[in-house]
Image (tube, rainbow, N blue to C red):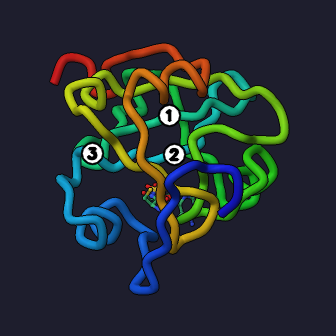
Amino acid sequence: MTGFPGAREFPQGTRTAQDAAAAIGCAVGQIVKSLVFVRDGRPVLVLCSGANQVDEAALGLSKADAALVRETTGFAIGGVPPYGHPAPLETLVDEDLLAYDEVWAAAGTPRSVFPLAPAELVERSGGTVVAVSPGR
Ligand code: 5CA
């Protein structure tokens, strides 16, 4: 948990979006899930609201396994931050996150999260804003 301003540590754990929302006392939709998928053999990071599910078929994505998550982001599942990875990574940002003033993302561990404005999330991740469940 380094380099993420405002990061907070929760001993009870923030491994899942539900855990994080309960610890912080915010809506589950305000939690940023940093999920790694594969498309055309390349990793794609989806920054998804904790309230949503990525429609893998609609976006042409398949789930990465734990080893690829680690290799791609440098972090283990449960603590993957939305940016600050070893190499640039194609990134999609769930449009529903933009409805909030503040969202919270993992700060590199399963017990730490940090707050930021959604516009900052888009800017720092270099992500493209999309509907993660188009047609729903
Ligand atoms: N710290 C929390 C909130 S910021 C967090 O990291 N949530 S998360 O959603 O970004 O990370 C957990 C996600 O990792 C799960 O939703 C699931 O999609 C994925 N995951 C969990 N176990 C595995 C696994 N064995 N292989 C691949 N992905 C997994």
Q: In x, y percent, where is residue 11?
A: 45, 85
Asked whether the residues under the numbered discs 1 and 2 touch, taking CB atoms below 8 Å apart as contact, a structural biologist would say: yes
Q: Is residue 100 above or below residue 79?
A: above
Which quadrant of the figure contains the C terminus? top left
Kindly tell me whether mark 2's CB lies below 8 Å from ligand 1.
yes
Q: In x, y percent, where is residue 100?
A: 22, 32
Q: How many marks?
A: 3
Q: In x, y percent, where is residue 132?
A: 34, 27
Kindly tell me whether mark 3's CB lies below 8 Å from ligand 1.
no
10 Å crowding of disc 1: few (<14), some (14-19), many (20+): many
C-alpha separation, residue under disc 1 versus residue under disc 2: 6 Å
Name the residue rendered at 77%, 44% in the picture.
72
C-alpha separation, residue under disc 3 versus residue under disc 2: 13 Å
Element assignment for label 3 = helix
Asked whether the residues under the numbered discs 3 and 2 touch, taking CB atoms below 8 Å apart as contact, a structural biologist would say: no
Q: Is residue 76 above or below residue 102?
A: below
Query: Closer to us: mark 3 or mark 1?
Result: 3
Name the residue rendered at 38%, 32% in the picture.
117
Name the residue rendered at 60%, 26% in the picture.
124
Residue topped by disc 1: 46
Which quadrant of the figure contains the N terminus? bottom right
Element assignment for label 1 = strand
| Outermost bottom residue | 12
Mark number displayed over residue 34: 2
C-alpha separation, residue under disc 3 versus residue under disc 1: 15 Å
Compared across the picture, whether 4 is left or right of 100 comes to right
Q: Amino acid at mark 3?
A: Gln
Query: Closer to us: mark 3 or mark 2?
Result: 3
Q: In x, y percent, where is residue 76?
A: 67, 64
Residue topped by disc 3: 30
Q: Amino acid at mark 2?
A: Ser
